[in-house]
Image (tube, helix red, strand yellow):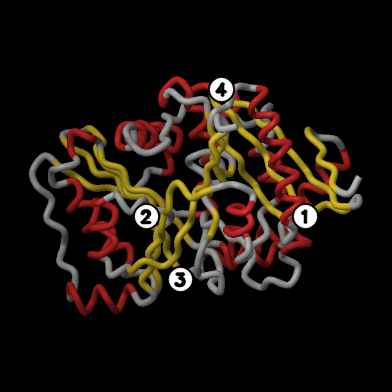
Amino acid sequence: MLYEVREGWDRHTRRDFFHLPHIIYNSDQNWVAPIEREVRRQLDPARNPYFVEATVRPFVCYNHGVVAARTVVVTNRLHERKFGIRAAFFGFFECLNDLEAVRSVFECVERYCRGHNVELLEGPFNPNHYSELGILVDAFEKPPAFFQSYNPAYYPSILEKAGFQKSTVLLTARNENVNEYIMQRYGQLPEAEVPEGYSARSFNIRQRKGELELLRDIFNDAFSSNWHYLPLSRDEYGFSAKFLQLVTEPELITVVEHEGQAVGVLMCVLDINPLLRKLHGKVGPIKYLRFIRDTKRVRNLIVYAVGIRKSHQHGVVFKLLLDAMLSTAMRFDTLETTWMSPSNALAIKASERLGMKPDKHFAIYEKSLTEL
């Protein structure tokens, strides 16, 4: 058989699943190898609490015995109950420039999905809506920042030839000289005026567990009506925040309170991708110590998430968070965002005030499984 697709994990498919990206990106200087141990943790139902309500199934395609394409498929019962559609989500998609391999792997994926009464296949989600999303569709010459997906230029067309179509296009924004921009537009920043009853503070690392629960509660409220958003459980948020201290600092997270209640959060993280690139997907004690040392030299800041409780989204909280963002960004050279929806007027408005311009675009693809 020319093409063979293997479903599920065994020793060989697991090895080839993780080896394929190293074949694809062998000569690509922009690629940042993910930490293999972390990807294994994300995809392990025994460790990742996301899979309490979801299932994951891997698929690996071979061409004459050589690995050529891979993906995983996730179904989530909570998504079906909230949005009223039986959807499946593919993720961790990688392939050689081999259309038949891609068609073969998705033929098996679709057969699996139809066997579970799935109506719509969407992706990539790696592995869910609060992970890296989408296929990069432009700016292939630019290296990815932290939490941005990256892929060869042939990925969009090969998915479309395999029967997928774009359903959503997300974007990131960037200001390469943010310190200079803020000085020119705003001058020396005055001390922020905080209205009576409000306060702004940094993340309290000494009360990490309670602070994470506070952030989870705000984000779940702020994003409850967003595209594909499912509320995160306490265990899910704790799982995703396990390595928070490696990508940010307490001073890069601002919490706005109103009469003692936390109502808004600005979370920024460091662009650690140049440091991750040096690790080549593996971490050891020496590499880890060097990584920690080098985070102090990172000059690129990323706006990771901004959440405001719905009851305060039309008040002063936005301005207080923007003031905090201006003050924080002054410490860095470059400022950029993670993915944003073009329909998120508040996020677009904030990025424009910070001098950020559209930089990269990422597409989510879909395929109806109800058509014959």
- Residue 189 vs residue 130, the one in the foreground: 130
Task: Identify the secondary structure beneath mark 3.
Answer: loop
Residue, disc 4:
53
Which residue shows up at 83% across the image and 52% down it? 67
Q: Earlier in the sequence, mark 2 or mark 1?
A: 1
> Three-letter amino acid code at disc 1?
Leu
As drawn, 223 above or below 290: above
Q: Secondary structure at mark 2?
A: helix
Q: Residue type at mark 4?
A: Glu
Which type of secondary structure does the marked residue at label 4 adopt? loop
**What residue did someone put label 1 on?**
20
Q: Position of residue 225 (x, y in %)?
A: 32, 33
Mark 4 vs mark 3, CA separation in Å: 39 Å
Tell me the number on the disc at residue 299: 3
Question: Residue 112 at what x, y percent from top left?
Answer: 69, 29
Quick check: marks 1 and 3 in contact, CB under 8 Å?
Answer: no
Q: Tag 2: Cα neighbours inside 10 Å, few (<14), some, or many (≥20)?
A: some
Q: Foreground: 361 or 265?
A: 361
Q: Residues within 10 Å of mark 4 (few under 14, many from 20)?
A: few
Q: Quadrant of residue 89?
A: top right
